[in-house]
Structure formats: C-alpha cells, structure tokens
Amino acid sequence: MTAASSKPDLFSKFDPLIQQREALLASGVEDPFNLVMEKVLSPTQAICNGRETILLGTYNYMGMTFDPDVIQAGKDALDNFGAGTTGSRVLNGTYQGHRAVEEALKEFYAMDHAMVFSTGYQANLGIISTIAGKGDYIVLDIDSHASIWDGCKLGDAEIVPFKHNDIEAMEKRLRRIPEGAGKLVILEGVYSMLGDIAPLKEMIAVAKKYDAMVLVDEAHSMGFIGPNGRGVAEEQGCLEDVDFVIGTFSKSVGTVGGFCVSNHPKFEIMRLVCRPYVFTASLPPSVVATAATSIRKLMHGANKRQHLWENSRTLHGGLTALGFELGTSEPQSAIIAVLMPDLERGAAMWEALLHEGLYVNLARPPATPAGMTLLRCSLCAEHTAEQVQTILGMFKRAGKTVGII
C-alpha cells in the first residue's frame, strides 16, 4: 500500500477525524461504525461476530421487518413486477404499487396528498429545497437532522436557526423576518439523538401567528406516538395545523423510502418541480409493496404501541436506577440516550455491551448535540419484557467493567 502523501489535498480537511479514528482503533476497540450483521434472526436478534446478539440499535420501532404479510407482499411484487423500475416517477417509474403506498399514506394520515421518495433523506432534501428558495426564510431548530440542513442549503433560502426546543427564541427569529417574505418553520416530532420531543402545539401556534408555513419531520414518531400512530403532532392535537409532514419507511414501517403528506391544494405540482423526486429512480416494486402492507397494518397497531411504551418506561427507569445519566429525565419516545463521559469510554462501553451480546449505537459529534458522546438505544415493540430485563443486566455488568457506574 502506498503511504499517504504529506502534500495537502482535498482530503486534508478530514485529517483530524482520521487521526481520531486511528487512535481509537489502536486502543484495541472494535470499529463501532463498521459492525457486520452476519444473519438477522428477528426484529430484535441477529448474529454479530459469530454470536447471538440482542438488537437495541435499530430503528425497527414496530418490528415490521419480519412481519409475514409484509414479507409475502414483497415476494409477490418481485414475482409480478420484477426487481426494479429503472426509471423516474415522472417517466416509467410509477407502478401500481407506488400509487398504492401513497393511497395508504393518505389514509393513515387522513390527508389529501402523499408523495413518496426513494429515501427519507431525499424527502427532506426535495420538499424543503423546492418550497423555500432564494428570498424566502427558513426558521429551524438548531438540532435539526442533517437532511433538513442539506435541504435548506440546496434551496438557497435564508437559514435562521434557533436554540433547541426554545419557543421564545423561535418567536424572536420570526419577528425579525421582513414582512411579506416567505417563511417556513421546520421542526421535528422526536429528535433522534436524545429521543426528546418538541413542544409542537406551542411552536406551531407561534409560527401561524407570523403567517409561516410549518413542516414537521415525524420520522422517529410515526407508527407509535399518537392515538393512531401519526406522530407527536397528533398526540399534541395540532396535526391539522401542520402544512407538511415528512416521514420515512426505514423506521416503524420497516423498509426503506421517504414521503411527504399534505393538505395544501397546490401540492401535486411538486411532482413536476421537485428535483430529488424528478431526477431519481423510483423505489423497487417489492419495497413499495412491503411499505403499503406495513402502513395498513400499523393502522391497527394499538397493542404494539402500548407494549413499546411499556418497554420504554421499563428501560428508562432501570437505567436511571443503575446510575446512568440519560438524555431525558423521563421516557419521551422509543429512543433512550445513555450519556458517556467521552468518546474513548463511550467506545469501551459500546464494546463491553457487544461482548455481553447487546448492540447499541455509539453516537459522537458532529451528529450529536453539544459535543456529546452517547449510546443510543432504540427499542422495538417486539422486545419482550424478559429481553428488557436482560438488557438492564448487560448494562449493569458492562457499566461496572468500564467504570461508568
């Protein structure tokens, strides 16, 4: 292998991260960002490094990845429509299944319009960059997901961030925007790193006071928060005041893809003007078939939602009792963040848990807020009560071994 050149090039800006990664691996820790699952046994178990492992680091909140009806729908679509569409939705890429999944979304959210993208990232990228452009203003939470920030940059609007979940700070930003300018407020239902929720009802009321449109990303709440699983906006009784709901199929739905639902009467023009929708291949028939089947089953998922909340309360309470510092004072979602003192001990804790037979996510800056290192636990409705108790035992042993508790 040729030694890396000392001459600066386009990769030089990554040198600090490269050195940090090399130092971490040199300490003997397994690469926490390159785990291979050799076999997935169920929504909650897999074979990792040759041993059976409990999965607590996926976004498979409702456990739909192995639902028999969902799998059969995908197999049937493969047989009847082939492996892919080889085209954009506006050309040859709209099959019967794409319309079916959009109909399922409209029914799920009780909204007039639904538009499906190839990923959740593309949904944010496409909708935000298309509706807010040069001369418009986007007011958004500083902890917004990377796809939201990238959508803002692509659209060339004025970006005005405010302190996380701070209603007063958001209003101050809105107050300063010139009268008559186009305004879009972007919020998330559940923030994916700490698992905390937004005070959407109050924030949306402020946004409407200043005649701003509102986009809410419900990626991490769809399926299990709210009476019908429509997310935090439904739970807080303000869904009808949201102009655009963004979501993904890669969390509770259990497959891949993204979407936007809306009641705006002009929404359908987005299919002709949204570049990340127009200029990319549509989802394969098997993927939209699994998504449509999953979404329709989630409409009747009350028992699963209840069990997932039970799991969240049990794990949050148990970890708190063991002495771990958590990202929220009480369980607010299916995400529970366990804060670590630094990256080195966070990586050591991650590896100790993996050796116990538990997989979680090691999250580090810049993905995390305020320079935190944390272990992110994502619960599933298919985790049994016994598995949650086993998980608590694993955290206790690993925490003592590493010196975190």
Image (spheres, rainbow, N blue to C red):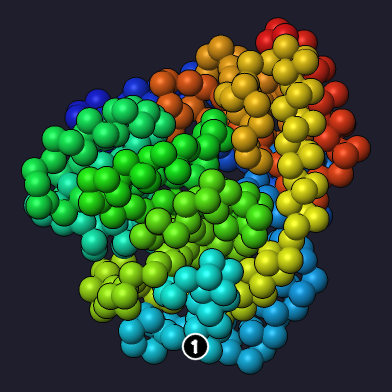
Image quarter in which the N terminus is found: top left
Q: Is residue 62 left or right of residue 154?
A: right
In x, y percent, where is residue 197? Answer: 52, 37
Splitting the image into 4 quarters, where does residue 17 fall?
A: top left
Residue under circle 1?
95
At x 41% / y 21%, what residue is drawn? 370
* 203, 376: nearer the viewer: 203
At x 87% / y 31%, what residue is drawn? 390
Q: Residue furthest right?
A: 386
Question: Hey, what amino acid is under mark 1?
Answer: Tyr
* 126, 18: nearer the viewer: 126
In x, y percent, where is residue 39? Answer: 76, 54
Q: Is residue 262 left or right of residue 403?
A: left
Q: Residues within 10 Å of mark 1 (few under 14, many from 20)?
A: some
Relative height, residue 354 to residue 258 (above, below): above
Relative height, residue 403 to residue 263 (above, below): above
Q: Is residue 294 visible?
A: no
